[in-house]
Image (cartoon, grey):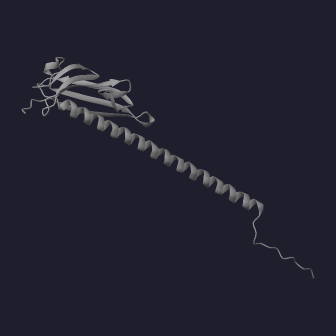
Amino acid sequence: MRRRTACNKNGFTLMEVVVSLLLIGIMGVVAGMLLVAITKGYVFSQQNNEISLKGQVAVAKMVKEIGSIRIETDKITAATATSISYTYTDPVTNTTASHTIAQAGTQIQFDGITLVDVVNAFLLSYFDNTGATTATLANIRRVDITLNLQGAGGIISTFADSAKIEESYY
C-alpha cells in the first residue's frame, strides 16, 4: 500500500497573493484619486465663496458711501466709468472730506484703501432723477455699480446694485 502524503490546502499560492495585492493596489489608487478630487472640489468651492463674499461686501460699501451723498451739502466732483469723487459734509460735525472710489489695476479702492482685488471689470453708470443717463455732475441722482470678480478656475462672478442720491432734510 502506498501512503499518500497529506497536502496542506490551507495556504495561498503565489499567484493568489499577487492578484490580491494587485486588486488592493488598484482600489487604493481609485480611493486616492477620489479623495484628491473631493479635496480639489472643496478648495475650489471655498475660493469662489470667498470671492462672492468679497464682491458683496465691496458693492455694499460702495452703495453705502455713494448713497450717503446729500444734494444740499455734498458735491460730486468727478465721475467716470471707473471712478467717482465727491465731497461729503458730516451732518453732526459739519466737517467736509473728499472721497474717491476708483479702479486701480485689478483692485477697487476707496480713498486709496483696497476694497476688493481680483477685479475683472468695473463699471459705474450715472442717471438723473428721471432715470436718463447723464454726464452732468450736478444732475446725478443714481449710480449703478457693476463689478465682475475672477474666482477660482477663471469663473467670473458679477455683482450689481444701485446707489440713490436723494435730498435729505437734516
Q: Nearer the viewer, residue 7 or 38?
A: 38
Residue 25: x and y, percent? 65, 54
Direction right: furthest residue: 1
Front residue of 44 and 79? 79
Image-based side of 62 in relation to 70, left or right? right
Which part of the image, by quadrant, shows the C terminus?
A: top left
Q: In the displayed image of the protein, which residue is found farthest to the top?
A: 136
Horizontal side of residue 41 vs 94, given as left or right: right
15 up-or-down from 165: above or below = below
Residue 100, located in which quarter of the rendered image? top left
Q: Is residue 164 left or right of residue 2?
A: left
Q: Identify the residue shown where x is 22% and y is 28%.
A: 144
**What is the x, y in percent for residue 164?**
16, 31
Residue 64 x, y percent position in the rendering: 21, 34
Task: Locate residue 16: give its quadrant.
Answer: bottom right
User: In terms of image quadrants, where is residue 65?
Assistant: top left
Picture quarter with the N terminus:
bottom right
What residue is at 57 percent from the left and 51 percent from the top? 32
